[in-house]
Image (cartoon, rainbow, N blue to C red):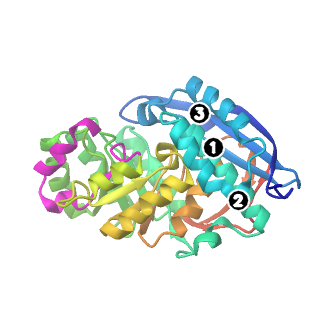
Amino acid sequence: MKIPAKYKIKSVRAYSENLELTRPYTIAYQTFDSVENIFLELQTEAGIIGVGAGSPAEFVTGESMASAKASLSTIADFLIGADLRRMDAIITRLHELYPNNPTAKAAADIALHDAYGKTLDIPLVDLWGRVHLCLPTSITIGIKSIEESVEEAKEYMDLGFKVLKLKTGKTVEEDVAIFSKIRETVGKSIKIRVDANQGYGVTETKAFYQQTKKLGLELMEQPMHYDDVKLMKKLPPSIRKICMADENLKSNQHALTLAQKPLHFGLYNIKLMKCGGIMAGRQIAAIADLADIGLMWGCMDESIISITAALHAAYASPATKYIDLDGSFDLAKDVVEGGFILEDGMMRIGEGAGLGVVKS
């Protein structure tokens, strides 16, 4: 059967860009001052263009930049001549063919969704049913000195942000001191969550929680190494309830396993770069919703393209409680603009079909 021109993919372009950061940052692993993203641009015979992006991070996704580029190149060839109406089947096949390349799959998945939304002339979120209109995003403070952390917290508060995410994972004593000083500086109205990036053990997690719970600790991302997930059961339920699976959550199968009672984590952090795109992210969200597990949608240093894709998926899920989608804020340049609107730390989806992004 002939594929109508508006649904048939005519051409695909895969490329990469090195995007410099305006503010270098440090986590438990290393310091970053730039980030390389991969991009996929597809065009239908009717002239509709869909764009996708990925941000490989080997320490999180297990995928090197070289591997991501190579996979994206072959994915591009695979997509030529495909029918957008079979998007879910195409993405399912990509997951089978490229099990170890989540960011390459994510770039293709996002481009397909963008093109499909544009073809139907509807924002992606409205394809699934919009649940949320606007939520506050957290903004991240990397591992720094007390003085630098406090100055950055003050800067973000002055810009209108209501939620701070503090990277921790050096020593509990240092981490608590920084948390305490930031709380003293910003007052009680600003929420503070932390991301230990697997930097703690059981004893350290308990100690940090005990010393910060009265200071308004909102939640704690991935306190212990993902290989030590069983150690989470050694934490009391009161701590596990506010702990969030991140590196332990890379697929819908992980989501199912972690949803077994009693829960290892009370919260999930979905990152499109870990799970392989919008379709997989929405599958994890559905599992979380059924298991009564709250969601945060997170990111790495990413283009507006993939940040916006995560925002569309997040706002279509009833389980979404938090967003942490600040990954494009510190980019000195990007390949697109638009997508979302940021006002006083609140993010809402912009106008336009598909992702609503336009080339810079």
Locate residue 313, reporting x and y percent.
55, 62
Q: Identify the mark nearer the N-term, 2 or 3.
A: 3
Question: Is residue 186 rendered magenta in the image?
Answer: no
Locate residue 146, reporting x and y percent.
35, 42
Locate residue 295, reporting x and y percent.
40, 62
Q: Nearer the viewer, mark 3 or mark 1?
A: 1
Residue found at x 12% / y 42%: 203
Separation (CA) of disc 2 from disc 1? 18 Å
Q: Quadrant of residue 286?
A: bottom left
Separation (CA) of disc 3 from disc 1? 16 Å
Q: Amino acid at mark 1?
A: Ala
Say what secondary structure mark 1 lies in. Answer: helix
Nearer the observer, 59 or 28: 59
Nearer the observer, 231 or 337: 231
Residue found at x 51% / y 64%: 314
Q: Identify the mark nearer the N-term, 3 or 1.
A: 3
**Rendered image: mark on residue 85:** 2
Q: Nearer the viewer, mark 2 or mark 3?
A: 2
In this rendering, the answer to whether 9 lies above or below 320 is above
Locate residue 70, reporting x and y percent.
63, 26
Residue tagged by mark 3? 35
Residue tagged by mark 1? 107
Residue found at x 79% / y 63%: 119
Mark 3 crowdedness (10 Å alpha carbons): few <14, some 14-19, many ≥20: some
Residue range (magenta)? 226-250
Task: Report whether 168 appears left or right of 336.
Answer: left
Residue found at x 38% / y 30%: 29
Say what secondary structure mark 3 lies in. Answer: strand
